[in-house]
Amino acid sequence: MSDTVRYVSESGELIGEMPLAAEELITCYRAMRRARHFDDRAVTLQRQGRLGVYPLFRGQEAAQVGAALALGPDDWLVPTYRETAAAITHGMPLSTALLYWRAHPAGWSFPEDLRILPFYVPIATQLPHAVGLAHASTLRGEDAVVLAFVGDGGTSEGDAHEALNFASVFSAPVVFVVQNNGWAISVPTERQMRNTRIADRAVGYGMPGVRVDGNDLVAMLQVMREAVARARAGGGPTLVEAVTYRLAPHTTSDDPSRYRAGSTTDERELAEPVSRLRKLLTGMDAWSDDAEEQLLAELKDEFDGAVAEADAAPEPTPESIVAHVFATLGADQESARRVLRGE
Amino acid sequence: MSDTVRYVSESGELIGEMPLAAEELITCYRAMRRARHFDDRAVTLQRQGRLGVYPLFRGQEAAQVGAALALGPDDWLVPTYRETAAAITHGMPLSTALLYWRAHPAGWSFPEDLRILPFYVPIATQLPHAVGLAHASTLRGEDAVVLAFVGDGGTSEGDAHEALNFASVFSAPVVFVVQNNGWAISVPTERQMRNTRIADRAVGYGMPGVRVDGNDLVAMLQVMREAVARARAGGGPTLVEAVTYRLAPHTTSDDPSRYRAGSTTDERELAEPVSRLRKLLTGMDAWSDDAEEQLLAELKDEFDGAVAEADAAPEPTPESIVAHVFATLGADQESARRVLRGE
Amino acid sequence: MASDVETRDARTTAADDAPTTAHLTMVQAINQALDQALAADDRVLVFGEDVGVMGGVFRATDGLRDRHGQDRVYDTPLAESGIMGYGVGLALAGMRPVAEIQFAGFLYPALDQVLSHVGRYRHRTRGRFTVPLVVRAAYGGGVHTPEQHADSPEAILAHAPGVKVVIPSSPARAKGLLLAAIDDPDPVFFLEAIKLYRSSRESVPAEPYRFELGKARVAREGDALTLVCYGGMVEVCMRAAEVAARDGVSLEVVDVETLVPFDQETVLESVRKTGRAVVVHEAARTAGFGGEIAARIAEHAFFDLLAPVTRVTGWDAPYPPFTSVEHHYRPDAARVLAAVRESLLS
Amino acid sequence: MASDVETRDARTTAADDAPTTAHLTMVQAINQALDQALAADDRVLVFGEDVGVMGGVFRATDGLRDRHGQDRVYDTPLAESGIMGYGVGLALAGMRPVAEIQFAGFLYPALDQVLSHVGRYRHRTRGRFTVPLVVRAAYGGGVHTPEQHADSPEAILAHAPGVKVVIPSSPARAKGLLLAAIDDPDPVFFLEAIKLYRSSRESVPAEPYRFELGKARVAREGDALTLVCYGGMVEVCMRAAEVAARDGVSLEVVDVETLVPFDQETVLESVRKTGRAVVVHEAARTAGFGGEIAARIAEHAFFDLLAPVTRVTGWDAPYPPFTSVEHHYRPDAARVLAAVRESLLS
Ligand SMILES: Cc1ncc(C[n+]2csc(CCOP(=O)(O)OP(=O)(O)O)c2C)c(N)n1
Ligand SMILES: Cc1ncc(C[n+]2csc(CCOP(=O)(O)OP(=O)(O)O)c2C)c(N)n1
Ligand SMILES: [Mg+2]
Ligand SMILES: [Mg+2]
């Protein structure tokens, strides 16, 4: 990983100077641990049949949380389906996230002030939206910045290219984060592309490209803060390649043994980001087993509360199928609605 | 134009060693002059109402002819609408080219052995075809190479990106030539993209990228021969940026005064490729006014013959509209055919 | 390639002594509508390939950049999916984007954005995110454009739930419908028949005005049979109706104008009166929008129909790039009249 | 995201003592057809996202890479327009490419290639260049897939002249139709109802066999009314017909199978006999393929119709991503029967 920004080694040792204060690190750790807790519990809920297909983010907590924590409250987050960690870090209520993965309409109808686009699966299609949101911010003289995620696989889609080019032509305040997690379902990054560094694509758009150890929260946050600051100051877009690893199956429906050896994952588990940061903090005497235990208790309570909230969401009616097709429904929706109401 | 391959200066002087023999240069010059003659005469025909909308290639003869001359007879040419010069150089009968621009069906129905895809306008969509053709060549153990053109504007389309990536992943024997002619209709390359070198995009695909003076036939041919040889030897794709200039309007329907000053063009005329090569040849004592005169007489005859041939093409019947929708027409085409026949 | 024919300047909304109407071509009326929308609402942005400096390949945006600035009217890179998705982002941010796609056949690279996003945001987010985006595109044949420049993909757009589809048939209708489309809280695809851009002029009120979307229009009254059509086919049907009138046959012409939401009632009312209908469009027949219209008429006016509903459409083939035969593809008055005769006989 | 359910191995065409039929799911029958096509013709290539090493998100290509090699069965980058255009190139070069698009909703990024190229090469080049490409895609709802994974875009494909559209309704039909599609000299879109992939098994002959494309199939005979349907709706209509039969109402079920070229005669013959028709599909109604079918019936069987042709379809809304209500979107036997009752009463 030469040419890759890193501050903390895989075993949790600091390399060089620490740019962050201990409190900041603790805030980051708490957010990552919270995300991990969400992921673990979501998988359990899924196994119980209380969530639908769920795309785990295990192993990608630093990339997502580090990126999201570089944002201010007015900044936009444009996720793929993988970014539940980033979304709950940027303010999405846990119950909303649960309801989305439960395929309940309340999982899409975000609070008005939440500056996050909903998760969605058509790969890379969200990236041009990010550019539009960002350019609108410039055109209005606002200083909101947009953080847009895409996967290594997603970089192959035409929309990824068009969005990068539009962003650079319009000098739009958007930071593209490619989470290179090694896989697009069963296809490894080496067969997704021939270039070994996704960050190199930036050259072709005349924008800065940075490759960062996406499992190193400190590096991720530093790189992102710089990119966000540049965007906010009118310096245009940045392409960040966060090198990470998808430790889990693609989704709860996937069986990775069909395409990768379990041993690969075991090895990668050693370098996973949550324990890496915990090791660092422990080494700094900034975190203890007690603190961890207390945090987990808090997270459990929070999650339980979110589940209760999600469970309380009223079941959608059949007529909700045609609601919101237009601001004012057409005659076709109105007549469908009558049928769905049983009229 | 630093980092840009060039052998002949704008005023027709050799820079460094001449890699080509004089006979070769003469062959090249004849092909370029032939293309120029075609272009000039086509515009006249268009003004007479004997061609439809015609996209001139004036100023891009070296880029197109140089690229096409690097091909062998079994190699494929995948053009945009702009590449009439490349096509007639790679063997397209002049009459076929004329009939295409006359929008006569015979302009699409190429001789069986002509390895050229028909001109077409949906920008960049031909590039994935080029990759498929090239990969098929490899899969069959053949050694045919594919030359695919696209414009500076065309590089912005998603298909351009997807094709470049597919080509590199499959190590397909295809050479992509971007003719950077400065304009996409009214949009200059600087507003099409932020990067100053299109060849830099190659880095992002892990393939060689070369920027060449596309108005220097010698440079163009040299760069292309190398790229074609590499592709043929199994070395995979190359991205060639041929820097040239669209001296003419976008098409015969375009009025460039709406977006660029006439003076720009006048200046560029001085560096145009046909006279540049002629100056070089004249300086080498390899070409004379007599030779030019004789060549022009030949070209005139050839073109007149092609016009006569084109004029002799029988008018299509109304029922040709539904012919060839399928190998065996469906009932819907058959019933349409009866109506169109007046039955 | 862009076709590009000279036009006169459409700037008719200048000073105090401005006339109250002007005789405009459709492209001028569209230019005026865009001008007025830009002037009235800061959130309106006009963008696309060649719309800025050059003023558009059809000059629909001529002069707008000079008048409203390069931050309001600007060129984009050559990438339709990018244009569409970027427009979605602007709309999500609360702007009122008006994108131009040069030809409807170049909407195809943008269809993923259309089908996956443009029509779905409001629905899937239960109204939290909306896309008040207008997409203008030149469509249809009849003017010897190059290959792929004469496509009519309205049925594809109409099959995308959540998307409105409007196709004006004259300068005055175009202005009022475009201003309504820009005001609409939902995405509107606005297809402009190339054939009508400059073929005729019409008196167009100088002031901004709006026609309600979702309403069909009886363009000519008659009682023998209803011609249902839209866009470039309206003038064809009107001509057919004139010819028929000379023979004493009175045809009613219904101009659909808005394909989605479809104004079924106006069409049915007419067919219930005449008892006969011929549906006309230039897109290929199979799975064209005419099938939808015919199916609705045949279902809901079943007991009033005196003859089967028939269709006069493009054939089940691509619009032919072969200039000398393309007029056999696009319906003309003669083909419409042949269908009328057949219907009247049955 | 990919859904992915376990399946049993479909390798049934092995040795001399191979059985002459096997009880297969539809996905196994498809796997067998691909296996046999690869074995029979060197020019056949199978590719797409995750089809190689992994064997496809639905395991339709399971084992094929091992048996036929990584030059014949392979993964592509994640880019559907690239897959489609690359497939066009292979076809132009004389190969017999069979591309997989994981879900029909992910055909959208490839629609430009479909509409601009796949269906046009033969026509525009007067037969000089042809595209014998097969594109398989999983479509339709009913199995709680994530958002956008349940789309049914057949009408869009059917509106692309030059493209064939085939939608099988059972394991045995799927095998015979897929082998015919791969043999076909023209491009074929082959849509596979996700709901049917593993829902039932059927006896499938072990040998390769082909069903002619362009033929509708009377799946059940009856005389009171014709249900016209395809793909995932055939089992729904068959169930409705069974229920109706218990009440002494005999419904005929016509399985369209090939949408383009459409076998109008078989449909008309049935409706002329029964005098009534209900058209069923799960795509949204407006501009869906049901409009086309209904319009043809209403036009050509006009004088035999005893009641209006009606449609039972998805509503004019996107397929809802909201699991608990999606079954109200996709037609079921109850909705079909309600339409049947209404038709019989009128
Ligand atoms: C347009 C489109 N094509 C295919 C799919 C199916 N699909 C879902 S996720 C996925 C892989 C994505 O890989 P990557 O972009 O690396 O993201 P990751 O899943 O690793 O986070 C694929 C092919 C899809 N959702 N959308
Ligand atoms: C998909 C698509 N979008 C838009 C157009 C309209 N159009 C025709 S040529 C052109 C500019 C192309 O520029 P470039 O790629 O640089 O090629 P050049 O014309 O300079 O050779 C445009 C926008 C088109 N033909 N296809
Ligand atoms: Mg990935
Ligand atoms: Mg150019």
Image: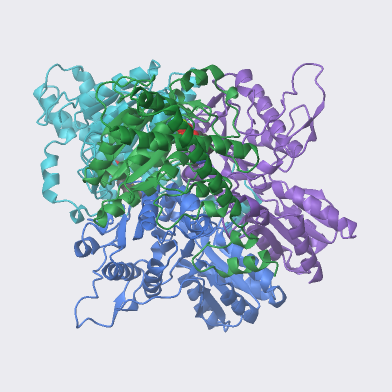
Chain colours: A cyan, B green, C purple, D blue
Instruction: Name which quarter of the figure residue C54 lies in.
Output: top right
Residue at x-position 45% and y-position 75%: D212
**D343 with respect to D324 (left or right):** right
The one nearer the camera, B63 or D71, is: B63
Residue at x-position 44% and y-position 36%: B154
In the picture, which quadrant includes the N terminus of chain A? top left
- In the rendered image, the vertical position of residue C277 relative to residue B78, given as above or below: below
Instruction: Name which quarter of the figure residue A178 lies in.
Output: top left
**B54 with respect to D58 (left or right):** right
Q: Position of residue B339 (x, y in %)?
A: 68, 66
- State whether residue A68 appears in this view: no
Q: Position of residue D312 (x, y in %)?
A: 57, 64
The one nearer the camera, C316 or C212, is: C316
Count numbered badges in the picture: 0
Which residue lies most toward the front here? B290
Q: Position of residue D244 (x, y in %)?
A: 55, 78
In the picture, which quadrant includes the C terminus of chain A? bottom right
The one nearer the camera, D243 or A195, is: A195
Residue at x-position 68% and y-position 69%: D299
